[in-house]
Image (cartoon, rainbow, N blue to C red):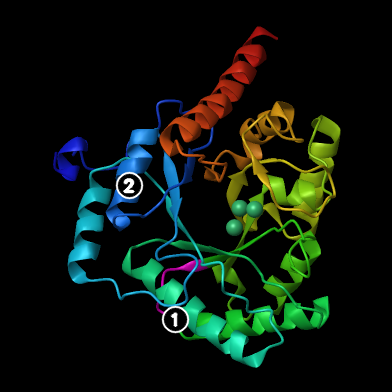
Amino acid sequence: MKAESRLKRDGAPQPPSHTKGPRLGAHMSIAGGLSTALLRGQETGCDTIQIFTKNNNQWSAKALTEAEVRAYRELRQGTAIWPILAHDGYLINVASPDRRLYRKSLTALGGEVARAAALDIPTLIMHPGAHRGSGEAEGIRRVAEALDTVLAGSTASPVSICLETTAGQGSSLGYRFEHLAAIRDAVTQRERVGICLDTCHIFAAGYEIRGRKPYERTIRELDAVIGLAHLKCIHLNDSQRELGSRVDRHAHIGRGHIGLEGFRLFINDPRLRHIPMILETPKEGDPVGNDRRNLAVLRSLAVLRLRRGRAR
Ligand code: ZN
Ligand code: ZN
Ligand code: ZN
């Protein structure tokens, strides 16, 4: 069957069937071509998806061909999937004190911005990087410098960069909201720098989100330190490891240390309703089945709360 015939071709993006909650989706593989991510997203029941625009474990990538971009655009226009977000490759480390790695990372990051632009993807999510023993302040300075260079080199680009919160493994930056705020504040074109919050990462970094009160405290802290207006994406992942473990291991929704209550609070928070929420939970040999189940769990949390709200 031709890929395209599986899609509705009714033009403009349609609102999701469950219009009361935020747009929900998952990270989708591009194995077999960029366009396949859209088909996988549709098959899975995603409102929104995140992709790598190239192999995430390699430095180099073949340039996007015109045919590839055309196929992707045509397919995208036929789906209701929106927005589409890009995540940068795992080798990039613009916080590195190693000049060679820093320069290589800078080039690669510039390439990621260009690829996102070619695909009309408005948001590129990146990890701040690891300072490798050179100190947090130095690392933060290098990340800001790199963002200044990349953004200055793409002034006409519609792409903005989202700094992701991290679990703080090793010497990784981004496990405190203050790190991301400091980077953003130091960037000249900071209106093109947003934030992506990952629930597993902030929990592992020590931000409590289980229960109404600690959740409120964490969201208020995020607002006070960075500003909720700059929050552009949320990654919904449960955590295999405990609060403050500083270890980054994603778990299925409700099956980790965060548990369902934390996700119920995110899904039903009116302040976050306009923000795309993306799963990066384990795929384990059945990507569609696993993602569908996690999406169903999230959607059930939203419905439950709305029913309760009416009953009160
Ligand atoms: Zn990430
Ligand atoms: Zn993430
Ligand atoms: Zn992670």
Q: Nearer the viewer, mark 2 or mark 1?
A: 2
Q: Disc 2 designates what residue?
A: 38
Query: Percent x, y for residue 111?
Result: 43, 77
**Front-most of 81 and 129?**
129
Please name whichever residue, 41 or 21, is drawn nearer the observer in this view of the structure: 41
Callout 2: 10 Å neighbours few (<14), some, many (20+)? Answer: many
Nearer-the-camera pick, 216 or 139 = 139
* Residue at disc 2, secondary structure: helix
Q: Residue furthest top?
A: 311
Q: Does the closest atom of ligand 1 sit within 8 Å of the Cβ of label 1?
A: no
Q: CA distance from mark 2 to mark 1?
A: 26 Å
| Prevalent SS, magenta region | loop
Of the two numbered discs 2 and 1 on the same chain, state the one appearing first in sequence: 2
Q: Amino acid at mark 1?
A: Ser
Q: Which residue type carries mark 2?
A: Leu
Asked if residue 15 shows in the view, the reply is: no
Work out whether residue 127 or residue 74 is closer to the camera in this orientation and state it: 127
Secondary structure beneath dot 1 equals loop
Highlighted range, magenta = 154-160
Quarter of the rendered structure image containing ligand 1: bottom right
**On-image quarter of the C terminus:** top right
The relative height of residue 184 versus residue 166 in the rendered view (above or below) is below
Q: Which residue shows up at 29% across the image and 55% down it?
A: 32
- Looking at the rendered image, the quarter that the N terminus falls into is top left
Residue at 56 percent of width and 67 percent of height:
90
Residue sitting at x 58%, y 69%: 191
Residue 205 makes an appearance in the image: yes
What residue is pinned by disc 1? 154
The quadrant where residue 127 appears: bottom right
Q: Are marks 2 and 1 in contact (CB under 8 Å)?
A: no
Alpha-carbon neighbours of circle 1 within 10 Å: few (<14), some, or many (≥20)? some
Q: Is residue 23 left or right of residue 132?
A: left
